[in-house]
Image (cartoon, rainbow, N blue to C red):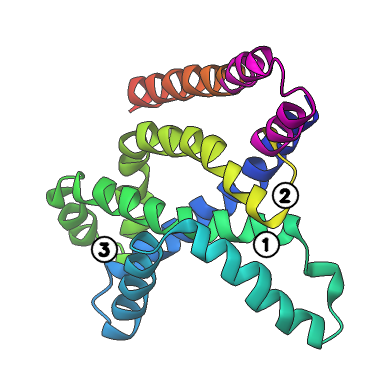
Amino acid sequence: MRGALNTLIYCGLSFPIAVFLGLVLAAMSSSNSIWLRVPSRMFIEAARCTPIITQVLLLYYGVGAVLLSFNLSTFANAWVAGVISLALNYAAYEAEVFRAGFLGVDPGQTEAALSLGMTPEQSFLKVKLPQAVPLVIPPLVNDFIYMLKDSAIVSVISGSELTSVLQSWSIRNSSDPLPLYVLALVLYLLMSLPIAYIGRTFEQKLRAAM
């Protein structure tokens, strides 16, 4: 139960950051400015095309060493590295989710908003983004469930979450670890299924309101 709670804390902290950064990256990558579009695309492709375990280790040992050199040891720990690495990695995927959502909105909506005198920023915030939200909710919910499982990667930097606690107890009870694996499976299901249900309900309500 302690491991499951830590898994929820890791994801509860990481995913909102990932969604916010993903939205910013999607807006940047859709921009006409090359100074915004190119850096965002470089980050998205680098985060998606490199193993998350490499990113975790780089943040923990590389950035952690830099923080220690500036006497910022408070931030050089598995919790901070785990949350930041999950958030940055998933931000790249959420950026693509938002970008697909924006492309799913009829371009005529934006043209109509501009013809009514809205600025491009107002058109994006008041017309395009609200219509894209119902389109992005299902993949966002899926990504949150994926993050619940991918959070096990923090075990490589001694992070304490469900899988690492399971491994520890399996070693202690090596003669009969099967009940522990079943318990971990049940806990993952108990965390994931309500999230999927809430996501579907929220999506239905949004679609009905539009």
**For the stretch drawn in magenta, what is the main secondary structure?**
helix
Amino acid marked by disc 2: Gly
The N terminus appears in which quarter of the rendering?
top right
Looking at the image, residue 69 sits to the left or right of residue 135; the answer is right
Q: Nearer the viewer, residue 139 or 67?
A: 67
Q: Which residue is mark 1?
A: 81
Q: Nearer the viewer's eye, disc 1 or disc 3?
A: 1
- Provide the secondary structure element on which disc 2 rests: loop
Which stretch appears magenta?
A: 163-188
CA separation, marks 1 and 2? 9 Å
Vertical relation: 63 (above or below) 191? below
Q: Residues within 10 Å of mark 1 (few under 14, many from 20)?
A: many
Q: Which residue is mark 3?
A: 117
Q: Position of residue 85 (x, y in %)?
A: 57, 60
Q: Position of residue 137 (x, y in %)?
A: 39, 34
Q: Residues within 10 Å of mark 3 (few under 14, many from 20)?
A: few
CA separation, marks 1 and 3? 45 Å
Q: Earlier in the sequence, mark 1 or mark 2?
A: 1
Amino acid marked by disc 1: Ala
Q: Nearer the viewer's eye, disc 3 or disc 2?
A: 2
Q: Which residue is mark 2?
A: 159
Q: Are marks 1 and 2 in contact (CB under 8 Å)?
A: yes
Q: Position of residue 28 (x, y in %)?
A: 35, 70
- Which residue sits at x=71%, y=84%? 66
Q: Nearer the viewer, residue 55 or 139?
A: 55
